[in-house]
Image (cartoon, helix red, strand yellow):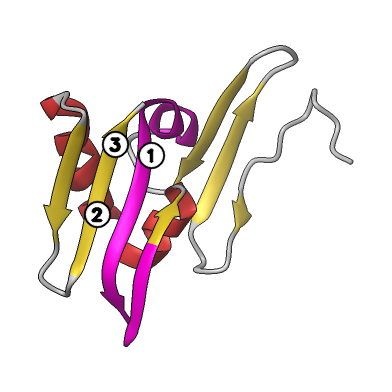
Amino acid sequence: MQDIGSPPKASKIKNQTKITINMDHNNYRGIYYQNLKYSTKEINANFKIKVSGESNGRKVHKLVGVSGLVDLVGDNDLVNTLLKKAFNKGLDKVEHKLRRGLKVTFYAC
């Protein structure tokens, strides 16, 4: 078990993306993925994310978290663009259709 007073600097997940966990004794501020402008706490507090379509020859139709979105889209710059548009539009439902056949839908919470 990890000591709350000393958060880890960075770690790796399965697609080799570095993440940083920010916390102090009483306040969890979320996980920041490398090159993402928003933390997981901000994204998960504002959106439910659904991905539909085809990825690597398999049909996909599921709710995902931030790590699932990064894994399926594969490009952090594109994920930043999708998130920026979803935050700026302020609608209940924002859909983005990618050329590779994926449809990413952000539902406001």
The residue that appears at 45% across and 58% down in the rendered structure is: 68
Which residue is more in the foreground, 17 or 62?
A: 62
Report the residue marked by disc 2.
104
SS under mark 1: strand
Q: Which residue is farthest top?
A: 26
The answer to whether residue 90 is left or right of residue 46 is left
The answer to whether residue 29 is left or right of residue 108 is right
Viewer can see residue 13: yes
State the extent of the magenta-drawn residues as a range: 39-61
Asked whether disc 1 touches disc 3, contact meaning CB atoms under 8 Å apart, the reply is yes
* Residue type pointed to by label 1: Lys
Q: Magenta stretch: residue 4 in it? A: no
Q: For mark 3, does the 10 Å Cα neighbourhood hold few (<14), some (14 to 19), or many (20 or more) residues?
A: some
Q: In terms of sequence position, does the residue under pointer 1 or pointer 3 come before the other? A: 1
SS under mark 3: strand
Q: Which residue is farthest bottom?
A: 57
The residue that appears at 47% across and 36% down in the rendered structure is: 40
* Residue type pointed to by label 2: Val
Residue 3 higher or lower than 36, as above or below: above
Viewer can see residue 75: no
Q: Which mark is residue 48?
A: 1
Which residue is more in the foreground, 13 or 61?
A: 61
The residue that appears at 60% across and 36% down in the rendered structure is: 21
Quarter of the rendering containing residue 14: bottom right
Residue 5 higher or lower than 63, as above or below: above
SS under mark 2: strand
Q: For mark 1, does the 10 Å Cα neighbourhood hold few (<14), some (14 to 19), or many (20 or more) residues?
A: some
Alpha carbons under labels 2 and 3: distance apart: 10 Å
Image quarter in which the C terminus is found: top left
Report the residue marked by disc 3.
107
Q: For mark 2, does the 10 Å Cα neighbourhood hold few (<14), some (14 to 19), or many (20 or more) residues?
A: many
Count of numbered marks: 3
